[in-house]
Image (cartoon, rainbow, N blue to C red):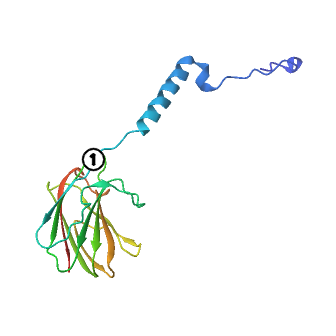
Amino acid sequence: MILNQANRHLPVRHQKPLAFRNPIRGYLLAVLVVFGVLGCQHTRQDSATSTPTDTGSVAVTDDTVPSPSTRNDGATGDTVRVSLGKEASPLTLTMRSDSLHPTVICALQVAEAGTLLAQLVPSEKDQNIRFSQIYLPNGTTDGPFGQTLTYPLKQAGLVRLRMSPSQMASGPSAGTFTIKLQLK
């Protein structure tokens, strides 16, 4: 620290960084960093289950057991895969989401072009769940939608329906809900 012009030859005093001025602050900082790193390594549990109910001649693929989503669509939930055709009866899936991972994706292998009819029926009347996005076979997306969806499909292929809570609505996002699907 320079006091006056006569003492200019004295060295300037350097201060320690803020965390090391007080040893308690240094320990507190170290503990916070450790908890932050451990908190980021949380493993998630499977959050969605499905029970397909065949009400007609719907072909259900072997991999209808929920598995973690591996698609690059930002999904954090689980994916259920089913096949759907025009000649098939409506398909009903019962699914469950939790508050930690509320997003669920239903991947439909559509055999031919047509109109997709989908309806979400929550188990609780005030449950906050909706069709948030549809991923089409040509790579385009559309959404958000409500709890009912009527969408013209111009080509066959993999169609993914993403269901998640609405950020503009209140109500619990966790719970059981039923999806009714049909291709006309």
Where the N terminus falls, by quadrant? top right
Q: Is residue 130 left or right of residue 2?
A: left
**Depicted 52 relative to depicted 37: above or below:** below
Coordinates of residue 107 in the picture (x, y in percent) = 29, 65
Q: Quadrant of residue 125?
A: bottom left
User: Residue sitting at 24 percent across and 62 percent down?
Assistant: 62
Coordinates of residue 163 in the picture (x, y in percent) = 28, 61
Q: Nearer the viewer, residue 82 or 106?
A: 82
Q: Is residue 166 left or right of residue 72?
A: left
The amino acid sitting under disc 1 is Ser
Q: Is residue 26 left or right of residue 107?
A: right
Coordinates of residue 140 in the picture (x, y in percent) = 40, 73
Q: Which residue is mark 1?
A: 99
Asked whether residue 134 is in view, the answer is: yes
Coordinates of residue 119 in the picture (x, y in percent) = 19, 68
Where the C terminus falls, by quadrant? bottom left
**Depicted 33 relative to depicted 154: above or below:** above
Q: Quadrant of residue 80?
A: bottom left
Q: Nearer the viewer, residue 49 or 123?
A: 49
* SS at badge 1: loop
Q: Quadrant of residue 70?
A: bottom left
Few, some or many C-alpha atoms within 10 Å of disc 1 (few <14, some 14-19, many ≥20)?
A: few
Q: Nearer the viewer, residue 18 or 99?
A: 99
Q: Residue furthest front?
A: 62
User: Residue sitting at 39 percent across and 60 percent down?
Assistant: 71
